[in-house]
Image: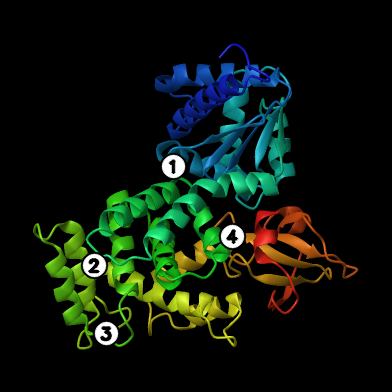
């Protein structure tokens, strides 16, 4: 890379994509001094030097997106997996991005990679900045993570939300309808693919969903996918899990599991494939004489059981339903008795202790609505919130976004949760900004 284009959007995206590819390749290397990675290290040095001369000499990692200057690159799964440890290490130090103030050399790049590995996780941004100054990274300035603006949030959500909405529309017709099954399965595959690219979008679209004929079934599928993604299930298994959840969620209360399994088997007219087998195994596992809860022999059965109860607690139609944080606490209280602890942990680490849509009262007197789950699974009680009522009690439109996990806000304390409907607040407006 010898230059960084300015207003040419297509060229800027091509350059930023090359930047992402080089950075991901370098991140895969266990040690940047290895001669095997000498060439890619040289590419990264050229990338960073060219970026330093641009109008916006920054790059930022944010989930499935790498921002290079003002250009966003949606990271494919292989690049995202490679860069995830670097993002996690930076965020543990309160860093979301890097500003490059001058041309760099190999020592500069090595200094950043070594610094995030060498300092303990609790070391904050200022300590890492001092480490860089002392070890050849003086041209780098560390940036706090960017809070998602309304535009950025919508851009990240749009592909997942569109796939989710298409699936929700297709799910209004049951799998038993031979004309409905192919488009429904195609919509489900698209949702799985989009969700794998931006897994943090699923808890958001779940909170934005309105009523519909297939509302419950689609929510159960979404919750099951959230758990499957956190467990790292491969694409094919995620699709099978989602189809299983859809099959089970459409069954009426008090269903006969053995009869449901027979019906599902009859639909497998061309023989029982792997997906059919997993669906059947889960349905048989739901039989009354098998027992429910953590003793279920099949992983899908345990995930679907959790998704079914979570949907009822988080999205139930009962006016006296629990607040979202109370629903999460109820699920956690039933670990070992009704649910597999590892699966509950996977769900809570994805949606947080305060799921998207939760309305929080802060000790500052502000009221905020959770608009994004925590960026890290070890910060489940510190979500990203949009302030909707200021300290004086005034309603805000497009209020500021606060990441309660960041050092500047780490002392903020959540003192209560309330029902947004009773306060006349719009969750959708807060989430989308």
- N-terminal of the pair, mark 1 or mark 3, is 1
Identity of the residue drawn at 25% across and 64% down:
177
Q: Looking at the image, is mark 1 or mark 4 nearer the viewer?
A: 4
**Residue assigned mark 4:** 373
Identity of the residue drawn at 14% across and 57% down:
273
Q: Secondary structure at mark 4?
A: loop
Identity of the residue drawn at 42% across and 41% down:
77
Which part of the image, by quadrant, shows the N terminus?
Answer: top right
**Residue assigned mark 1:** 81
**Residue assigned mark 2:** 176
Q: Secondary structure at mark 1?
A: helix
Residue 18 in percent (x, y) is at: 50, 23
Q: Looking at the image, is mark 3 or mark 2 nearer the viewer?
A: 2
Can residue 145 be seen in this snapshot?
A: no
Which part of the image, by quadrant, shows the C terminus?
Answer: bottom right
Q: Looking at the image, is mark 1 or mark 2 nearer the viewer?
A: 2
Answer few, some or many: residues within 10 Å of disc 1's Cα (few below 14, many 20 plus, some between 14 and 19): some
Identity of the residue drawn at 21% across and 64% down:
278
Task: Check if mark 2's residue and mark 4's residue have beta carbons within 8 Å.
Answer: no
- N-terminal of the pair, mark 4 or mark 3, is 3
Q: Nearer the viewer, residue 103 or 306?
A: 306
Q: Is residue 156 above or below residue 168?
A: above
Can residue 397 be seen in this snapshot?
A: yes
Q: Looking at the image, is mark 1 or mark 3 nearer the viewer?
A: 3
Distance from Cα at disc 1 to Cα at disc 4? 19 Å
């Amino acid at each position: 890379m010898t230059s960084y284009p300015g207003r040419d959007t297509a060229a800027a995206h091509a350059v930023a994509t090359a930047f992402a590819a080089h950075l991901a390749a370098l991140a895969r290397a266990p040690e940047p001094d290895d001669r095997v990675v000498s060439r890619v290290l040289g590419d990264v040095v050229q990338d960073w030097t060219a970026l330093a001369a641009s109008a916006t000499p920054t790059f930022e990692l944010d989930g499935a997106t790498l921002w290079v200057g003002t250009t966003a690159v949606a990271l494919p799964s292989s690049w995202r997996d490679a860069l995830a440890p670097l993002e996690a290490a930076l965020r543990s130090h309160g860093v979301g991005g890097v500003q490059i103030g001058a041309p760099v050399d190999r020592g500069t790049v090595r200094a950043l990679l070594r610094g995030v590995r060498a300092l303990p996780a609790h070391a904050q941004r200022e300590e890492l900045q001092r480490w860089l100054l002392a070890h050849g990274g003086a041209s780098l300035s560390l940036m706090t993570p960017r809070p998602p603006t309304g535009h950025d949030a919508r851009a990240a959500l749009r592909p997942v939300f569109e796939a989710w909405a298409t699936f929700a529309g297709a799910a209004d017709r049951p799998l038993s309808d031979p004309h409905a099954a192919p488009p429904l399965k195609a919509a489900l595959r698209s949702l799985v693919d989009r969700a794998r690219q931006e897994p943090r979008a699923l808890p958001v679209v779940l909170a934005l969903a309105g009523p519909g004929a297939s509302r419950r079934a689609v929510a159960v599928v979404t919750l099951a996918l959230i758990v499957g993604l956190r467990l790292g299930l491969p694409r094919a298994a995620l699709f099978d899990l989602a189809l299983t959840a859809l099959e089970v969620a459409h069954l009426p209360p008090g269903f006969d599991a053995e009869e449901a399994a027979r019906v599902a088997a009859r639909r497998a007219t061309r023989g029982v494939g792997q997906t059919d087998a997993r669906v059947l195994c889960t349905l048989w596992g739901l039989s009354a004489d098998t027992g429910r809860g953590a003793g279920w022999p099949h992983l899908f059965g345990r995930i679907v059981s959790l998704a079914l109860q979570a949907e009822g607690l988080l999205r139930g139609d009962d006016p006296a339903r629990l607040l979202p944080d109370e629903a999460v606490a109820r699920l956690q209280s039933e670990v070992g008795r009704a649910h597999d602890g590892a699966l509950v942990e996977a769900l809570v680490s994805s949606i947080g202790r305060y799921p998207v849509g939760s309305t929080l009262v802060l000790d500052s007197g502000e009221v905020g609505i959770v608009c994004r789950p925590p960026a890290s699974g070890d910060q489940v009680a510190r979500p990203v919130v949009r302030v909707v009522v200021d300290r004086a009690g005034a309603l805000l439109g497009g209020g500021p976004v606060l990441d309660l996990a960041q050092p500047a806000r780490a002392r903020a304390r959540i003192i209560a949760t309330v029902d947004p409907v009773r306060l006349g607040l719009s969750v959708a407006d807060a989430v989308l900004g």
